[in-house]
Image (tube, rainbow, N blue to C red):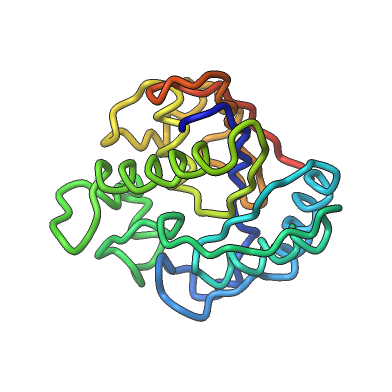
Amino acid sequence: MTAPLTLYLVRHGEVSNPQHVLYGRLPNFHLSETGIQQANAAAQYLANVTLAAIFSSPMERAFETATLLGAANTRHPDIQVDDRLNEIYTPQEGKPLVELEKQQFDLLSGNQPPYEDGAAVRARLLAFVADCRARYGEQSVAAVTHGDCIVSLLGYACGKPAEDFGRYQLQTWGLPEVYPATGSILRLTFHTHDVDERPTFDYICPY
């Protein structure tokens, strides 16, 4: 049964990326020293929140962040890896960031399977949210994921189409930054049992 839920969406900390490429789902990209500090700041913010569960994307940087959250939380919940929290799947992986900036980081338009478009990303994330509302009703859950996944769910909360990732217009949606910062938290709050409810949201940068 769908129920109210507080969902803390945590973006992983900064990544060690000396070649400045889009790492996406590529393996072996870990938190930098700054990223560890950012993840610890998020962990301290959530330390006294009664978390029923902590979920993580399968990517190393996300699991490392989730592990720090779990260690700091008073309940020390186990980390559950969920593929639905994974980074978006795009053919742009490995390309230099300077090239992607020229196309305004449009990583989804025109993608064909097996790559994802905005609708595919939104669908898997909403399926994850629905499961959390069914399993953890009236409780709080943390989920460590990626920037574009957070943007997709922010767009859902704001009633935006799944194809609109809004990287350069998020401030008009109510976010104080042009893109969710590494180590930041987007709190989604579902207040009712309505399966189609659009949650309210708060954005926290804990450092």
Q: How many marks?
A: 0
Of 31 and 62, the residue lying toward us: 62
Vertical relation: 106 (above or below) 158: below
Of 53 and 174, the residue lying toward us: 53
Vertical relation: 183 (above or below) 157: below
For the point 83% across and 49% down, the residue is: 47
Image location (x, y in percent) of residue 132: 52, 43
**Figure quadrant of residue 29:** bottom right
Image location (x, y in percent) of residue 150: 49, 42
Vertical relation: 34 (above or below) 150: below
For the point 49% across and 39% down, the residue is: 134
In the image, farthest residue toward the bottom = 28
**Figure quadrant of residue 73:** bottom right
Q: In the displayed structure, does residue 86 sit left or right of residue 109?
A: right
Image location (x, y in percent) of residue 94: 36, 72
For the point 64% across and 47% down, the residue is: 142
Q: In the displayed structure, does residue 12 sit left or right of residue 147?
A: right
For the point 34% across and 24% down, the residue is: 160
| Quadrant placement of the C terminus | top right
Q: In the displayed structure, does residue 115 sit left or right of residue 173?
A: left
Image location (x, y in percent) of residue 109: 20, 46
Q: In the displayed structure, does residue 157 sit left or right of residue 143?
A: left
